[in-house]
Image: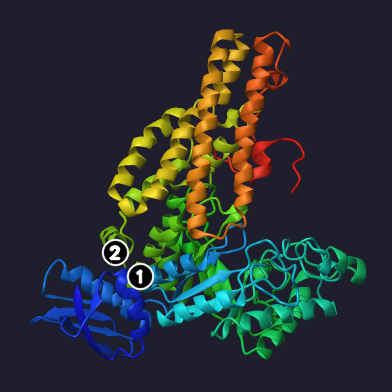
């Protein structure tokens, strides 16, 4: 469609050139006229008397508004739509540290989609995957971004009205960064820096300086979450025991001084201050208030409260009130649940997003973002998060959000059917799993990777009919694939996963049952099935590889290759062992003689949880090197 967009477009003209092809429009003086105005606290689109109008405040809102105008114009030539922006900032954080490092082209794709949705900030979570010239081993062979790559992404986002914010770690979560010998003098534990050590702050200044050379923003996320072992390693040996709050505050003061040196306003994850909030906390005075000396010791940083676990609105409201006790209103981080295993946990993502967004609006939280973590390998493609990004976007522009709004906007912004994507949750939300998979069962991951002869999860899945469940899921995903042609590659991958699990999920149970009966011919029949599984797991691997290399740098894929390879090569050994028994070379199979127990560690067995774990605890009960 040809459009003649005129008026207050100086702040969006560069981005408009980028977004034109995404929206399939041509900018032309003889196109359909749309008058643009930039006004404070206003977002509306209209069309009447063969004239369009867009009124916007922030540049990214123009791109959302343009999309809404095009969407409505296809339906009618008379309309007026206005939206009320709920948050001052609403953005995305994508994990580029756990194997998957999105390419510059994929970051650009994400930025374009965010612009059309109206999401205004993007954090790249980089523990060690950014270039720090003083430390060549920092991010070595991990797909780190060069400074130039980050500048390209930053400029691209700027043109679309999206602020890119560096998101790094300056205390913990640095296992991969400090595993090399260069860091031996300034690490406390395997993944935490040594507080008060001069070399620590030289290292951190180099990291902060590197980000300042790549990003325009004056905001930086400096992490500091989940440092539960702080002060208990080399620090303890050098200085003796000290309360972790005091260590953290002192360290934070020094890091904040470094960020200020480079013109940054820092934010941190707030969880290490959670002990302050308990009603019986030692950090409260006789009146039940958090002690003033504790509050005064917390540096001037913004606190990011993360919670992607609760589906009850009051949980979030109470946490916001606790944060306000510290004299500051928190930033909120929710989650898209791209880290459940191999498939997205849409049930939990939707339930927690709805509850948290209602709470944010009620408590007048002004800044929110949605996280796309990639725990334990980034096996779930980050593109599966787009439906949840859309949900966040609609909550950003509406007090109340309807399913119809989300469906319509996702269809326009991402050329996808929201309900079809939701089918993918049933890869993990299987029989035996509670509604919305709130207890985070990783059914598809544990049944794909678990060993057929060892069957560590067989007792967990016994009697649930998972094979039938996955076989029934195959045509459902195929139908979804046909409804979403632009997403064919993604649905192909998940259709193949369901197909493999339709056979493999219960194969170990069936094999042991036949062996226990000493049904030789039935055991022999599994040899053919094992060949089929081997072939189709390899097909699954290649489908996954295509998705990975389209979106991410190649570094990190070797980990996933090894995991698939483990399934494939173990099938060779399973066949070898079965044939030994069938041919009388051995009189029993020790692996199948073992009684199957519930897999109960380290994850607690709870209702609605079939299984969940990190890879090396799925594939063996033995010693698997980390």
Residue 58 visible in the shown view: no
Residue 240: x and y in percent read 90, 69
In the picture, the quarter occupied by the N terminus is bottom left
Which SS class for mark 1? helix
Q: Is residue 291 above or below residue 93?
A: below
For the point 47% across and 52% down, which residue is it? 547
Q: Nearer the viewer, residue 319 or 193?
A: 193
Determine the residue positioned at 63% across, 22% down: 575
Residue 464's spot in the image, x, y percent? 48, 29
Image coords of residue 230 (percent x, y): 78, 66
| Callout 2 crowding tier (Cα within 10 Å): few <14, some 14–19, many ≥20 | many
- Most foreground residue, 330 or 410: 410
Q: Using the image, tell me which numbered label, if any, was put on residue 409.
A: 2
Query: Is 380 displayed left or right of 479 in the figure?
Result: right
User: Badge 1 is on which residue?
Assistant: 117
Q: Earlier in the sequence, mark 1 or mark 2?
A: 1
The crowd level at tag 1 (other Cα within 10 Å; few <14, some 14-19, many 20+) is many
Question: Which residue, as the protein is rendered here, is positioned at the far left?
Answer: 49
**How far apart in space, not on screen, are marks 1 and 2 (Cα)?**
8 Å
Labels 1 & 2 near each other (Cβ < 8 A):
yes
Q: Secondary structure at mark 2?
A: helix
Query: In the rendered image, which quarter is residue 120 located in?
Result: bottom left
Q: Quadrant of residue 613?
A: top right
Q: Nearer the viewer, residue 84 or 215?
A: 215
* Nearer to me, 137 or 348: 137
**Is residue 531 in view?**
yes
């Amino acid at each position: 469609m040809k459009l003649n967009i005129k008026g207050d477009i100086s702040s969006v003209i560069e981005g408009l050139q980028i977004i034109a092809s995404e929206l399939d429009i041509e900018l032309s003086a003889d196109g359909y006229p749309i008058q643009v105005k930039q006004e404070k606290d206003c977002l509306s689109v209209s069309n009447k008397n063969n004239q369009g109008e867009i009124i916007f405040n922030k540049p990214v809102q123009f791109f959302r508004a343009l999309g809404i105008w095009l969407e409505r114009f296809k339906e009618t030539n008379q309309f007026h739509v206005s939206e009320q922006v709920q948050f001052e900032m609403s953005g995305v954080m994508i994990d580029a540290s756990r194997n998957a490092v999105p390419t510059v082209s994929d970051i650009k794709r994400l930025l374009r989609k965010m612009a059309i949705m109206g999401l205004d900030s993007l954090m790249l979570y980089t523990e060690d995957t950014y270039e720090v010239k003083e430390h060549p081993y920092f991010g070595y062979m991990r797909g780190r971004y060069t400074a130039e790559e980050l500048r390209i992404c930053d400029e691209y986002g700027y043109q679309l009205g999206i602020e890119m914010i560096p998101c790094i770690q300056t205390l913990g979560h640095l296992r991969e960064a400090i595993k090399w010998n260069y860091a031996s003098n300034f690490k406390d534990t395997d993944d935490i820096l040594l507080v008060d050590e001069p070399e620590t702050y030289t290292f951190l200044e180099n990291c902060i300086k590197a980000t300042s050379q790549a990003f325009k923003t004056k905001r930086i996320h400096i992490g500091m979450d989940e440092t539960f072992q702080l002060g208990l390693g080399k620090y303890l040996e050098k200085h003796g025991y000290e309360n972790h709050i005091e260590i953290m505050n002192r360290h934070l003061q020094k890091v904040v001084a470094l960020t200020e040196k480079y013109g940054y306003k820092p934010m941190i994850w707030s969880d290490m201050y959670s002990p302050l909030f308990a009603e019986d906390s030692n950090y409260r005075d006789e009146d039940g208030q958090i002690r003033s000396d504790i509050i005064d010791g917390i540096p001037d940083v913004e606190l990011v409260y993360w919670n992607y676990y609760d589906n009850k609105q009051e949980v979030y409201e109470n946490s916001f009130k606790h944060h306000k006790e510290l004299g500051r209103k928190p930033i909120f981080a929710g989650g898209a649940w791209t880290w459940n295993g191999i498939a997205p946990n849409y049930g939990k993502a939707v339930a927690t997003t709805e509850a948290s967004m209602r709470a944010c609006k009620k408590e007048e939280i002004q800044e929110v973002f949605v996280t796309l973590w990639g725990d334990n390998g980034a096996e779930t493609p980050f593109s599966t998060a787009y439906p949840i990004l859309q949900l966040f976007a609609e909550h950003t522009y509406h007090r109340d959000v309807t399913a119809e709004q989300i469906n319509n906007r996702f269809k326009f912004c991402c050329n996808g059917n929201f309900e079809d994507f939701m089918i993918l949750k049933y890869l993990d939300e299987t029989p035996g799993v509670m509604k919305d998979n709130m207890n985070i069962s990783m059914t598809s991951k544990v049944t794909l990777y678990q060993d057929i002869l060892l069957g560590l999860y067989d007792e967990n899945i016994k009697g649930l009919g998972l094979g039938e469940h996955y076989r029934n899921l195959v045509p459902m995903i195929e139908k979804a694939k046909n409804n979403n042609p632009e997403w064919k590659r993604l649905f192909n991958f998940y259709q193949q996963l369901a197909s493999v699990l339709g056979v493999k999920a219960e194969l170990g149970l069936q094999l042991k049952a036949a062996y226990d009966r000493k049904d030789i011919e039935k055991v022999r029949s599994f040899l053919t099935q094992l060949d089929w599984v081997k072939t189709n797991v390899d097909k699954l691997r290649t489908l996954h590889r295509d998705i990975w290399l389209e979106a991410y740098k190649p570094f990190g894929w070797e980990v996933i290759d090894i995991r698939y390879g483990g399934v494939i090569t173990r099938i060779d050994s399973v066949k070898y062992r079965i044939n030994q028994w069938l041919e009388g070379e051995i009189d029993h199979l020790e692996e199948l003689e073992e009684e199957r127990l519930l897999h109960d560690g380290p994850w607690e067995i709870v209702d609605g949880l079939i299984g969940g774990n990190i890879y090396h605890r799925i594939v063996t009960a033995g010693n698997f090197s980390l």
